[in-house]
Amino acid sequence: MMALRQEAVPRPAATNVIATLLEKRTGQQLQANRAWRIDSTLTPVLQARGLPDFDALALALAQGRDGALADAVIEALLNHETSFFRDPGVLEQALSALAARDRPIRIWSAGCATGQEPLSLAMLFAERGVPVEIHATDVSSAAIARARAGRYSQFEVQRGLPIGRLVRWFEPTGDDWCVRADLNERIRYRRHNLAGDPVLPGGFDMILCRNVLMYFGLPMRRRVLDGLSDALRPGGLVLLGAGETVIGQSERLAPCREWRGFYAVV
């Protein structure tokens, strides 16, 4: 394996090539406050491919002849940060908002990463005996593959998953925990790019798109929010991350009066 040069730090020209590729493929912008991710996440890619520095990586990407290298760069840069029952009060609100509806409930978890969010929803609805159809998507093929596998480390299950639910819905497998098949089968996973692919068909009662819009520029946020609006059934709701809003970014969605933190079609 070729050793990295000591001066192998991303220079502005190389950073620009990498950031352009990320935005073209995913719609996500690599803001200045996230540029550190290039060094921290792509150094293993350099080492694995025997590239001496980021200039060599940028040159290979610019030539566009190595699709596997471009895929590896994108996968490394994507943020898969998630946990079970993140903001549990919000998820309980989601259940309350939907449980009384007199039709089969359809939910879309957009940007689901490695599956903890849709699994949390599946557990909540199963425990209350409320039928639900959950679709879960992410731009990362690797994340979707992990979500489908339903296998989590001890560290991952300790992040937000109560011991009672761990024992009820998961089975120990070596040092890891595997979600029970009857729970994981309630979720339909697929790769989907919010920035470029058509919205999922069929209409949804709720779409969770938490901490995804923050990576997009304003024009892309507007486009994505319009798409989510189109994907809602009448009376459907959108849930964004705690630090995200539709205010100033969408004329089609507005804060929901009944359910705090949710948004409804105007």
Image (tube, rainbow, N blue to C red):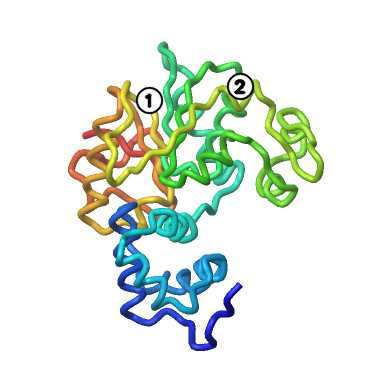
Estimate the x, y position of residue 74 in percent, counting from the top left: 42, 57
Q: Which of 256 and 224 is in front in this view?
A: 224
Can I make out residue 158 in this image? Answer: yes
- Circle 2 is placed at which residue position? 126
Estimate the x, y position of residue 90 in percent, counting from the top left: 50, 40
Q: Distance between the residues labelled 2 and 1?
A: 17 Å
Identified at 46% across, 74% down, the residue is 36
Q: Nearer the viewer, residue 20 or 185?
A: 20
Q: Residues within 10 Å of mark 2 (few under 14, many from 20)?
A: some
Q: Which of 135 and 160 is in front in this view?
A: 135
- Circle 1 is placed at which residue position? 205
Extreme residue in the top direction: 102
Estimate the x, y position of residue 105 in percent, counting from the top left: 44, 19
Estimate the x, y position of residue 209 in percent, counting from the top left: 40, 43
Q: In this view, does 185 lie above or below 64?
A: above
Extreme residue in the left direction: 251
Q: Is residue 163 above or below residue 185?
A: below
Extreme residue in the bottom direction: 7
State the count of labels.
2
Q: Is residue 64 above or below residue 88?
A: below
Identified at 55% across, 45% down, the residue is 87
Q: Quadrant of the C terminus?
A: top left
- The image quarter containing residue 191 is top left
Q: Which amino acid does label 1 sit on?
A: Asp
Query: Is disc 1 placed on a helix, strand or loop?
Result: strand
- The image quarter containing residue 139 is top left
